[in-house]
Image: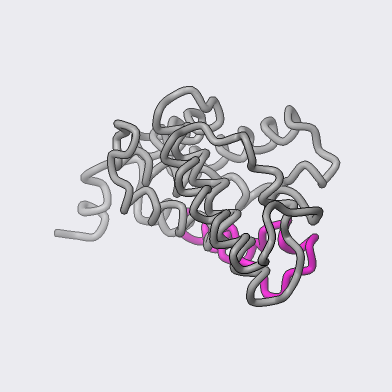
Amino acid sequence: MAAADAAGTADSAATPARIVDFLALLERLKRTKRTGWVRSGVSEPESVADHSFRMASLALVLAGAEGTDASRCIKMALVHDMAEALVGDITPHCGVSDEEKHRREAEALESIKEMLGGGAAAAEVAALWNEYEAGETKEANLVKDFDKLEMIVQANEYEQAQGMDLSGFFNSTRGKWRTPTGAALAEEVERRYNAHKGVQGGGGGERSA
């Protein structure tokens, strides 16, 4: 079967040329460093792609947690920061309102949909992103917890490797877990964090990667 036919089986709008353009766009996520780590002075900070990969891996090994659709959670984890390929990693410290951040990212998603040809694949990417942003479904709530969890796991790793205070990242998540699964995993990460520091609780540092 020709490559064009194979690629068009699932979504005829997503032609080989469009798919390769899409892959080129996603390459930017591999080069976009997470803003919170950059602001905190972390050496060799992770990229947005690094963060999304570990989130998706978490969704894979916790398939069906909280009665969720595992496949949808994995896809949502991969899509949730996709707009950052066009707008960058905007955090609360960038001086951009939540409304403006959402507007920019929604506009970026429209560009991604157009890049994919506006067919079934484009519609699924947009639907997953909108579902995550709305945060109303079981899947969105779980993936939002995975987003915060991956951040504090990374904060703990950077603290141990680089000897810096990133406790603010932990502080920014406490009391904000949406699911029992997220809360239980966070408790384990906090236990390891406190064991390493030899203290209970934390102090300052940047907030939100």
Relative to 152, does residue 109 appear above or below in the rendering?
above
Viewer-proximal residue among 9 and 208: 208
Asked whether residue 25 appears in the rendered view, the answer is: no
**Residue appearing at x 46%, y 33% in the figure:** 179
Q: Is residue 126 magenta?
A: no
Residue 117 at x, y percent in the picture: 43, 40
Relative to 29, does residue 207 appear above or below in the rendering?
above
Disc tally is 0
Where is residue 120, by image quadrant? Answer: top left
Viewer-proximal residue among 1 and 26: 26
Relative to 140, does residue 71 appear above or below in the rendering?
below
Residue 135 at x, y percent in the picture: 52, 27
Query: Looking at this rendering, what residue extends furthest in the left direction?
Result: 1
Viewer-proximal residue among 163 and 119: 163
Query: Looking at this rendering, what residue extends furthest in the right direction?
Result: 95
Relative to 122, does residue 99 appear above or below in the rendering?
above
> Which segment did they paint magenta?
22-48
Residue 205 at x, y percent in the picture: 79, 56
Where is residue 14, by image quadrant? Answer: top left
Viewer-proximal residue among 209 and 122: 209
